């Protein structure tokens, strides 16, 4: 199926729960609500004709311009995106991309991580990838079997891929800069 | 005792019968067979493993954060340090992602050079994989043979870019320099020298009785598990079965880039009955099953043969290839995003790059999808129920590089 047909199939099934779509970019994608994530993912994986058996990658992207002078011209509102890249094993070469838009902090309370349902029950790849996104981007995956830091130390503070991350001055007596 | 019956039910293996209290055994981060700094915490019952918990991050440099602060060309040297055994393939993966975002069209000459260099690096990388796997299992000689040949590839790389490990040769828009005069002949000379050496490796390892005993029916990974964990490259291909109609899962075949669709080669998936391994008549050693450590090893060995075929075709094309070896990339990245995967020696290496809406030279986000990261995550699944002594055989057969896992 071409990306246009995949999006048409999704729109037929989910209607206006598909919030936005882009076809004129290198990788076509749709935007959905976090609440619909599990349902859409299960459909993408199991529907004959789609069969996205492989989750290639989960990425968290922090859209924020930390410099207040540049912020008005940045071209985006501050928010977080979680991007899921999928590919099909049954139909080699078939790829698709899903996106979630999130607030940078849950309930606009700095420090409260936004929440996304975990897809680790659908693809085991998500287990480590979600731990990595949690570790580096600070997004909490509800229903994850074992959500703890993976690349950084367990007692690390903050999430380095947030644009407003402050580099630590010292860690256990090791000078940071 | 035949290897075919080597399983948990085997009554002659006393280790399966002797059970003790549950015990946690730490392995690493400096264990010689963990291929870099990886720490495994094993939960054991006697000699039998009940759980393996990998602890990563000892080599973590947060390359993705660095990528957000430098221009794409400045980031190329950092990609070398991900999979440092296949630096060229990492350069290529990142360059292709940036080129996809910029919509650049690469001249034929640059494409041909890229194919030659990437496949040479694949051979060098699989030679280390093969040699180091022998070391894991306690044989030293294959390592020396492998490094003898790898040294010649590194000499060829040194001629084109001056570096022997971290090349930064393939860059955005093509390759950094054209091939030096006489290099094509020297490369062909190396291939002519190298081809008769491959049967030696098969004698040393592939059909070696001790090697087969250690790897046959060990760490069996099913196709379904491999797909669910996102395993790619030789780890996934070792679990596929051509007779069941599984696709030849190789990105060079299914989503060709750099003009791979114009080269004549095969993607390696089991069974290997119609592959020429140099000493026919030849059959898979008894006891091996599809998806075990031996098959993953064998996929790498045969990929080397296919890479030689690709290089030889590319060397013939090079003198007549049109265009320049490099075109100038745009000064600023366009807005938007692109995700590109390539078939690196250890699996599908993907880069995801997001350009700023203000068309800055520095990207908003760089993400590296590491193949070894996914391949390593399956370790717990396939080590469960095996003996402690099998851990090096299984972990070694996954052939990961911690620099790429931790990034």
Image (spheres, rainbow, N blue to C red):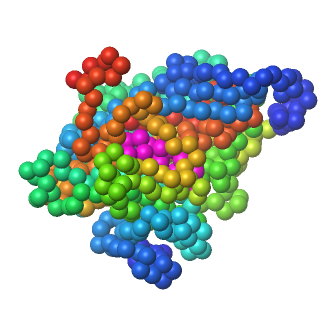
Q: Residue at x 61, y 49 (%)?
A: B226
Residue A129 within the segment the image draws in magenta: yes
Q: In this view of the protein, can residue A174 be seen by the observer?
A: yes
Q: Main secondary structure of the magenta part?
A: helix
Q: Position of residue A84 (x, y in %)?
A: 43, 58
Q: Viewer-proximal residue, A1 or B172? A: A1
Residue B241, picture quadrant: bottom right
Q: Where is residue B251 in the image (x, y as percent from the top left)?
A: 47, 55
Decide: is A13 above or below A142: below
Q: In this view of the protein, can residue B374 be seen by the observer?
A: no
Decide: is B319 above or below A101: above
Q: Viewer-proximal residue, A176 or B162? A: A176
Q: In this view, does B350 lie to the left or right of B273?
A: left
Q: What stretch is highlighted in magenta?
A: A123-138
Q: Which residue is drawn at 32% across and 16% down?
A: A173
Q: How many labels does the image show?
A: 0
Q: Is residue B382 left or right of residue B361?
A: right
Q: Where is residue B279 in the image (x, y as percent from the top left)?
A: 68, 36
| Image quadrant in which the C terminus of chain B is located | top left
Q: Viewer-proximal residue, B275 or A158? A: A158
Residue A3 within the segment the image draws in magenta: no
Decide: is B188 above or below B200: below
């Amino acid at each position: 199926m071409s990306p246009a047909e995949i999006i048409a199939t999704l729109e037929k099934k989910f209607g206006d729960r598909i919030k936005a779509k882009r076809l004129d970019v290198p990788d076509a994608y749709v935007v959905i609500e976090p609440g619909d994530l599990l349902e859409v993912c299960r459909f993408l994986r199991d529907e004959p004709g789609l069969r996205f058996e492989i989750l290639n990658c989960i990425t968290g992207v922090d859209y924020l311009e930390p410099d207040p002078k540049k912020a008005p011209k940045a071209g985006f509102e501050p928010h977080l995106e979680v991007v899921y890249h999928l590919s099909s094993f049954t139909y080699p070469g078939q790829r698709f991309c899903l996106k979630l838009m999130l607030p940078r902090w849950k309930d606009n309370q700095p420090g409260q991580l936004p929440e996304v349902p975990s897809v680790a029950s659908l693809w085991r790849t998500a287990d480590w990838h979600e731990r990595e996104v949690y570790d580096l981007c600070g997004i909490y995956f509800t229903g994850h079997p074992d959500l703890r830091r993976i690349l950084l130390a367990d007692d690390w503070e903050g999430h380095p891929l947030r644009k407003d991350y402050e580099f630590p001055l010292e860690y256990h007596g090791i000078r940071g800069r | 005792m035949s290897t075919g019956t080597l399983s948990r039910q085997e009554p002659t293996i006393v280790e399966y019968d002797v059970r003790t209290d549950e015990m946690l055994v730490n392995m690493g981060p400096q264990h010689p067979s963990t291929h870099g700094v990886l720490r495994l915490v094993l939960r054991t019952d006697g000699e039998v493993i009940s759980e393996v918990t990998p602890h990563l991050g000892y080599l973590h440099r947060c390359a993705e954060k660095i990528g957000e602060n430098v221009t794409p060309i400045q980031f190329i040297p950092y990609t070398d340090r991900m999979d440092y055994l296949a630096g060229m393939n990492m350069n290529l993966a990142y360059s292709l992602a940036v080129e996809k975002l910029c919509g650049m069209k690469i001249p034929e000459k640059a494409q041909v050079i890229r194919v030659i260099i990437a496949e040479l690096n694949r051979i060098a990388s699989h030679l280390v994989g093969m040699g180091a796997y022998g070391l894991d299992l306690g044989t030293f000689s294959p390592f020396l043979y492998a490094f003898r040949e790898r040294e010649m590839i590194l000499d060829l790389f040194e001629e084109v870019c001056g570096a022997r490990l971290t090349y930064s040769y393939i860059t955005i828009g093509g390759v950094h320099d054209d091939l030096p005069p006489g290099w094509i002949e020297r490369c062909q000379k190396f291939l002519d020298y190298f081809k008769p050496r491959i049967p030696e490796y098969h004698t040393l390892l592939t059909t070696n009785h001790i090697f087969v005993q250690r790897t046959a029916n060990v760490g069996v990974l099913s196709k379904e598990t491999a797909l669910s964990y996102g395993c790619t490259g030789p780890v996934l291909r070792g679990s596929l079965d051509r007779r069941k109609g599984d696709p030849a899962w190789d990105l060079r075949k299914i989503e060709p880039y750099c003009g791979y669709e114009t080269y004549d080669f095969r993607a390696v998936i089991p069974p290997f009955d119609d592959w020429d391994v140099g000493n026919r008549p030849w059959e898979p050693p008894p006891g091996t099953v599809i998806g075990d450590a031996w098959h993953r090893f064998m996929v790498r060995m045969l990929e080397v043969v296919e890479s030689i075929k690709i290089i030889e075709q590319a060397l013939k094309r090079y003198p007549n290839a049109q265009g320049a070896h490099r075109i100038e990339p745009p000064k600023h990245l366009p807005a938007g995003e692109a995700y590109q995967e390539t078939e690196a020696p250890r699996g599908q290496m993907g880069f995801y790059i997001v350009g700023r809406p203000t068309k800055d030279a520095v990207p908003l986000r760089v993400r590296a999808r590491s193949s070894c990261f996914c391949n390593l995550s399956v370790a717990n699944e396939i080590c469960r129920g095996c003996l402690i002594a099998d851990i090096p055989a299984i972990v070694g057969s996954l052939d990961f590089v911690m620099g790429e896992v931790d990034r």
